[in-house]
Image: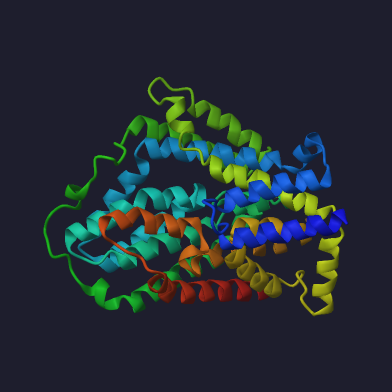
Amino acid sequence: MTSTLLVALFVCVYFGIALGRIPGLAIDRTGVALLGAIGMLELSGMPFAEAGSLIDLHTLILLYALMVFSAQLRLGGLYTQVAWRLTLLLAHPSRFLAWQMAASALLSSLLANDIICLAFAPVIARACLGAGISPMPHLLGLAMAANIGSATTLIGNPQNMLIGQLGGLDFADYLSWSLLPTLISLAGAWVILQLLYRRVLGDLPGTERSARLAANNADPIFDAWQTGKGLILLAILVALFFTDLPRDKVALSLAALLLLSRRMHTRSILGLIDWHLLTLFAALFIVVGIFRSTDAPEQVIHWLAAHSVDLANGQVLTFVTALLSNLVSNVPATMLLAQTLDPAHPKLWYVLAMASTFAGNLLLIGSIANLIVAEQVAPLGVRIGFLEYARAGVPVTLLSLAILSVWLLI
């Protein structure tokens, strides 16, 4: 009876995550996951000490440490500085689109794609509006490039960090496997945006005003020392990721060095930590961990196998991952699908990482990065509608997934 109730609650939790809310309540996906974790703990009678063992602290520590790095560079003004320098290319909108997508992808591969979108979106929108050109293709390019670029490494986004830790993946091996399909997908996204917005991208700026005039006082002021310190330690961190040293311990140790500052207050840095996301991860670890204690996962796998749905097949896993990621979001989907994969077959983990990330480009609600771009530019009068986004997002996602499927055959 208890197992049946646990499975029923698990289904309700994932259904609530898919909806993103509970009707009549002001609660989001994290709240749903947290309530689900508490409910499953009560139903199972599992002691808190045992429940704590279900949480993968290695993943949470790595995610936390990289958030500290991102906060340091954001407060140091790096993201805003890069974005404003890119706007100097606005005289050639098509070229600007290419360069800002490349920069977004590169930064997102090393730091959280959400933060890149948070910093870049308002700068790009204000610069485009100030120059008298449509910001739409550039904002869509920002979101899609940030998502695609984050698939390149095991630290580009939260689900990749999770996959890297759970699968025990080698940083260099994954990078060498993912780099080419990611670059092709990025180029394909640029081509699609060029075709869809060729008239808009053909418009030249209608004003000679410098884009810098559109700067906002809320933008962090560029600090060469704080940015330089962050970049040097980030370079050291990435270099150490190519060794056998534990990624979480290395990241946390170097993040601690960032806190040793005479001017950058610890409270300012930690204030930018996404505690909401960390809570979501912790809750989902408990929800999925207790769900695994029932025999339901094995029954589902046997049922899928009986209906010719083999998750050990790369193409099938790509499709299932993309579908589930758009139903319940990529982090919950990844956490669930990771339970079915064998660490002895790293390529399947690679597929899970890339497919769950590429799937985020399908719809406006497909990833947090997309929503951040839409929310950041709304106060400027720029509205990214659901259909407007899907017009570019659907072909970009289908192309990226097709490239991944072909790459599996090579």
The N terminus: image quadrant = bottom right
Please state which of residues 325 and 345 is positioned toward the viewer in this rendering.
325
> In screen coordinates, is 166 left or right of 221?
right
- Residue 363 seen in the figure: yes
Image spot of residue 373 (x, y percent): 39, 57
Residue 338 visible within the image: no
| Quadrant occupied by the C terminus | bottom right
x and y percentages locating residue 259 in the rendered image: 49, 26
Among the 4 quarters of the image, the one containing residue 199: bottom left
Q: Residue at x 17, y 48 (%)?
A: 213
In the current view of this chain or complex, which residue is farthest to the left? 208
Give the side of residue 208 with respect to residue 53, left or right: left
Vertical arrangement, residue 4 with respect to residue 33, above or below: below
Q: Determine the residue positioned at 62% across, 74% down.
A: 405
Rendered location of residue 334, percent (x, y)? 66, 58
Q: Position of residue 50 (x, y in %)?
A: 81, 38
User: What is the tally of numbered marks visible in this picture?
Assistant: 0
